Every structure is written in C-alpha cells, then in structure tokens.
Image (cartoon, coloured by chain):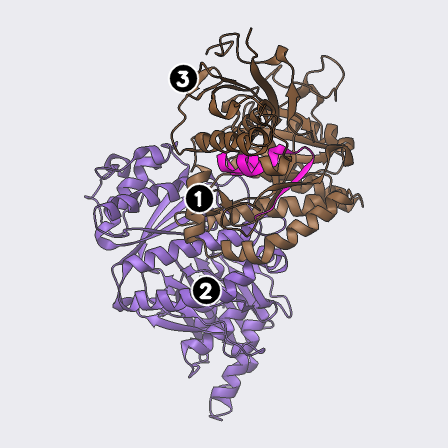
Chain colours: A brown, B purple
Amino acid sequence: MSTVYQATASAPVNIAVIKYWGKRDTKLILPTNSSLSVTLDQDHLRSTTTSRADPSFVKDTLWLNGKEDEIKPGGRLATCITELKRLRQATVENEDPTAPKLSTYKVHIASYNNFPTAAGLASSASGFAALVASLAQLYALPVSPSTLSIIARQGSGSACRSLYGGFVAWQEGVHPDGSDSLAIQVAPQSHWPNIHALICVVSDDKKGTSSTSGMQLTVDTSPLLQHRIKAVVPQRMKDISKAILEKDFDTFARITMADSNQFHAVALDTEPPIFYMNDVSRAIIAVVVEYNRLSLANGQGYKAAYTYDAGPNAVIYAEEKNIKEIIQLVVSFFPQREGAFKDNLGVFPPGAEVNAQATVPAGFNVGVALKREVGAVKGLIHTRVGDGPRALGEEEALLGPEGTPKILA
Amino acid sequence: MSTVYQATASAPVNIAVIKYWGKRDTKLILPTNSSLSVTLDQDHLRSTTTSRADPSFVKDTLWLNGKEDEIKPGGRLATCITELKRLRQATVENEDPTAPKLSTYKVHIASYNNFPTAAGLASSASGFAALVASLAQLYALPVSPSTLSIIARQGSGSACRSLYGGFVAWQEGVHPDGSDSLAIQVAPQSHWPNIHALICVVSDDKKGTSSTSGMQLTVDTSPLLQHRIKAVVPQRMKDISKAILEKDFDTFARITMADSNQFHAVALDTEPPIFYMNDVSRAIIAVVVEYNRLSLANGQGYKAAYTYDAGPNAVIYAEEKNIKEIIQLVVSFFPQREGAFKDNLGVFPPGAEVNAQATVPAGFNVGVALKREVGAVKGLIHTRVGDGPRALGEEEALLGPEGTPKILA
C-alpha cells in the first residue's frame, strides 16, 4: 500500500483599508505602495484547497469549483506551483535525503470558494492563499507565512495578505526580485476580535474595468497617483497600524474611509477615467457619513467605516457593539429580499425577518439618501475579523480516492 | 425734464475647461489656482441686467427674475455695487467736475436669466458679469474688462471669466488684495468660432454639496488638492492656452477631460467625500470615451471633450463638423421628451424630431452604456463659443419708467 501525499487547507478573504493600486513590476506583482487589510472570518467566506502529489499523475492539474482550469506555462498558477516545488526541494529534500521527492511528482489540486463569484467579492486573494497553504502543508515546508506570502503575491497581489489572520500589512519592499515584498501581521485576530464587517453586495449594470488593467492605466496616466504613493500612503500605513495596536476605532475609521475615497479618486484621475462605485455605492456612503455625523455630534466618535474595492460593493467595518444598529440602518434604506439575510452571528432573535428590523437612530437625517427598491443591495453578509489559513482534516478533502474532484460541476 | 441714467447689458455663461476649485481668500474670492473657460453664446444662455441711478431712490435695490433679492451689507452684491460706485467716483467724477455725481445716487437693478434655474447651470457667473457690465456702462467707466473682472470676481469667482468672450483665463494672481486676480482673454470668439457645445442636462435625485462650501472642505481635507494646484494646473494652463491658439482640438479635448476628471477626483478625496456626477453622468462619459476611441482608431484624433462642473450635467465641446454626429449619438442613448430639443443652430431639417435622428457611428460599441429611459437626460442645449458682455438698447430694458421691474414675478 502506497502513502497518499495529500493536504487540505482553507484561507480567508481580506479587505484592504489602505489600498493597493498599481504595480512597479507586473510580472512579479510588486506594488507601487504598501497596503493593509483586515482578514475576514473564514467561517463565512473562504477558499478551500486540496493538493495531492503522486508519481502516477501525468501533469499538474487544477480544478476550480469542480471545473478544470488551465495551468498556463509561465502563468500565475504555474509560477506559484513551481516556486513551492522549488522550496520543497531546497528546504526539505536537500536537507533530508530520506524525505520523499514530492517536488518531482505532478500535483492534482482542487479548490472551492464557499461564496458565489456573482457576489463580486475578489476570490483570487483567498484562492491563491489556500493554494499556497495547502501545498506548503503537503510539502511540510519549514517556512513562515511571510515567506509563503511572497509566493501567493505572485499569484494575485492581495493574496499575500490572506496568509495571516487579523490585521495584515503588505510591505511594498525595495528589492527588484520581490524578496522583501511580503505580508506581515500587524496584530492577530485575538488582539481586536470585536471588529465586525458588513458586506453590502451592490447590483451593477455591467462589469467595469478589471483591476489588473485598471491599475496600470492609473500608473501610466494619473498625475495624482505618484503623490498618493510618495506623500500620503506611508504616513497612513503608520497611523492606521498604530490605531489598530491601540484599538482606536476613530482613527481606524477615518483613515479607512479617506483611503477608500483616495483610491477611487486616482481611478477617476485616470485617462480614460475608471469608475467602480455607482449611485447605490454613493448612497451607502451618504448613509454612513450621516451615521457618523450624528455619532460625532453626540460625542461618540466614528461608529462605522466604509471601504470599496474595485467594484460597487461596500464593506462597512464597525465595532461589534454597533453592528446591529448599522444593519438596521442599512436595511431601512436598502431592504433585502425576504429570507435572503443570513444572520451569521445571531444579531437578531431567531427567525426574525431582517426588513422588519429596519430602523434609524434618533436624530438621523433620512433625507441623505432615497429608500431604494428591494434588490438595489442584493445581499448583506455579516462577518468579522478572522484567522489565517487553516489545515483541514481528510474529511474536508476535495479530492477523491482517484485524485480527482469529489464533485464535478 | 430730468435725465434718466439707465443702462442695460447682457453677459454670457462660461464653462471651465481648467477648473477653479478652492479659495485662498474666501472674502475676496481669490482662487488657489488659475482656471480657463469657454464663453458660451449668449443668444442661447444669458443674463440681462438693467441698472438705473436716480437721486429719488431711497436704497440700492435688486430684482432677480422679477423678485426682490436682499442686498446684505458687506455681502457679495453690496461689495460689487460699492466697488463700481467707488470706480465711478475715482475715474469719472474726480476727473471731470461736470460729470453727474451718479456714485452718490442709489441704484435700482433688475436682472433676468433666460435659462431655467432648474437646469442646474450656474447662473451666478453670467448674473454677476451682467450686473457689473450694466453698472460699468451706466457709470461710463473708462476701464478694461480685466479691471471689471476683479469686481465681478468678488461677486462670484467664475463670474470674472464672463467679462470676455471666446477663451478666457482667470489668473490666480499673487497679491493679497486680489488686484492681479483677474480675467484675460486668451483668444476671442472669432479666433476659433467653430467650437460648439452640447449641454446635457442630467436629472438628479437631490441637490448635492454647494460648490462654495464644497471647495473649502476640499482645501481643508484633500491630500491630493495641493499637488493638483502646484504640480498639475500650471502646466495644463500653458498647454491648453497653446492648444487654443493653435486650434489643436486634440490637445484641447484631452486636457479638458483630464481636468474635469481631476476636479471630481479631488472632490472625492475630500472628507466626507463629495460626489457631483451620478450614474447618468458616468454613462455620458462612457459614450464620449468610446466615441473618441473609435475616432482615434480611425486616425481622426479626439472628436469630443466632456466636462462637468459641480453637478451632474455634462457639457460636451466639439468642433462644428462633428456636432450633428454627437447629438445623434447622445440621443441614441438618452432619448429626449418629444418636442423638447430646440435645434438652435439648425443641425437637422426643419421640423425633424430629434429622437428620430438617433444613430451611432459605424464601429461604435453600444455595449459601453445602457440605453436610458426618456428624461434621464432631461434636456440638450446646443450652443457654441460666444462673445463677451453686450450693451443693449432701451427696448431691452428690464426697468419701467418708475424704476421698477417691467414684469414682477
């Protein structure tokens, strides 16, 4: 009986509060500026990947959500797999001659996202992080998540941040080979566990510019981007890291919103201009701005922080104590399809219909936005700061005995 | 029989291509950067003002569109009237002791805009320019439009540019008293008369931030604004002035669109962010971008330039030869209410319904924007570059024999 070399890992989604936008090296995916993100709870949003190495396999093969995905030679998937095999050889096989030569075997990889692509949430970050984590586990690599993050980065830039839980910085680095462009953990999940997130999935007429092509257009044409990179981001990285370490939500919120706005500002300063937010996104901003205005007027500081990636969806960060009020507020402007809201974290009484919970705080100026029709915000996902990649047991493996996906799409 | 001292003048609207956004002195209205505009034809959009000085009048009084408007002491209207009286005294009455002492008389002023306020077109520029022009005429001031522009500027910043026709720069100046913050003509209407404009009046849910308060919020909070002011605008002022002098529409269009985008980018970089464009504004941009892409692909250069002020309305500048095609293109995405389009400049056969003229150029990708319902763009105004303030005859006076408005609202 031969040994089965197989490992399964899951990895979380992360949402940046200091945005990455623009590469100084498009092949190695080296960014023009550092960035910082919050890792979200993979109980709600995750990618799971099973990898197996076997001498009988004839080629490296990957199935994404049950469907075979091409591993193009020289492409991002191939780069990550090659780098991990190289690390296996260098750090395990060369050190211990008795170690199985897994680096010489082809691999079969099955990956699955538990959230719909239609949600408009970047799945490449969690996807590449899970790929790297499962292969690192399969290969028993004696390396840190930061080292692995260098490999994940070459798959998808922001994937490097999903190698850690909690609050994670991607340091831009200075070396041309990218060896210092990696993720470090600013603070673990346990440091500030009551940071919650409400993802507002916004309907969109059509797909906008892809972030890969969009960011390079901005690098090439925006007169404001270089100023952002040189004069704004470094200070914000310091300030928000300090805010996280001090659990200073006020500063965290202020910088998070300012950086989201500035990212969209440089996108707009691109030729031709890039727009990711639409009128519904703007209306969510207006609601959060008014919510904070009211709170500040009451001497309570900022209570919510919106951030938008390269799409119309809002992510609202808030402390746990305010999240119920925020859900009630959002639903009062953006009613949900009946039964659509999953009360992941038990904010409401069991069985409560979310639209029936809609209410705005006393003193809130409801004139800041129009109440929208059901479906303008087509989904709300309540989650919170989470941990980094997890090693999963055999019972969660996605590959069957034959080394093919258990469920084919 | 006593002499009637009365004068009537009209003044045009202007739409900036290099945007003014932010004051370094809010009282004197001194801008943080120079700006440049195109004066539009007052046959289509204008303010008309009649001023009368009479020893029997008991107070300075102004009627706007037939309704009395308060002249607050120390306010902008009062400042303009006081300055013009001072100039009358200094340059006329002190020089010629026989000149009537009009500066000592109270004035009655009636002003009227021939375009609806609901159109969302800034009427303060043409309004203050017409006020200044009519009083300057009444007082027979021996001064240049540039000198008058210093006074109009103190009424409403961009009003200073409406003291000239054609292509007009507002030089920011350096003196703290504002004596060199004035308008100069870069080129007269006659230099490049075939520059046309299509104003697309866009429906809006609600009134956004006023530009007066919005621009100071940006000055106070945007990290990108200072870079725009120092590093971007000075070069653009030079480049677009050169493009105008050389009738280089390609460069004119590229800078116009880039500067509109950058103005909205710094508005977005404000805390809290300011949005003036909505989804319809964005769709118009997408149509113009695709129209230019097609033209560039055909080796014909840029054919249209959008620009947006502090609101959702688009102004599209184009050369006369392309304006028919542009109207047809715009109407194909944004159909008009039947009979709403006034064919000011005779682009279509007499009596033609504009929606029936809708068509897109061969090769145009109609997927860039959705076709909207009638009324998403609620009006189209076709106009062109125009002349500066005009002295009008008695038959166009807005004040009756008693020195009160001929028509009271």
**Is B126 covered by the magenta stretch?**
no
Residue displayed at 27% across by 39% down: B354
Disc number lying in front (1 or 2):
1
What's the mark number on residue B168?
none
Q: Amino acid at mark 1?
A: Thr
Horizontal placement of B26 versus B136: left or right?
right
Horizontal placement of A387 versus A31: left or right?
right
Horizontal placement of B299 versus A111: left or right?
left
**Is A150 covered by the magenta stretch?**
yes
Residue A17 higher or lower than B233, as above or below:
above
Residue that badge 2 annotates = B233
Instruction: Please tell me which residue lies in front, B10 or A15.
Output: A15
Residue A383 higher or lower than A170, as above or below:
above
The total of numbered circles placed on residues is: 3
- Relative image position of residue A138 (x, y in whole percent): 58, 22
Residue that badge 3 annotates = A58
- Relative image position of residue B326 (x, y in whole percent): 28, 45
Which residue is at the far right?
Answer: A299
Magenta residues span: A149-172
Of the residues under marks 1 and 3, which one precedes in the sequence?
1
Disc number lying in front (2 or 3):
3
Element class at badge 3: loop
Distance in Å between CA atoms under marks 1 and 2 = 30 Å
Residue that badge 1 annotates = A26
Residue A106 higher or lower than A297, as above or below:
above
Circles 1 and 3: CB distance less than 8 Å?
no
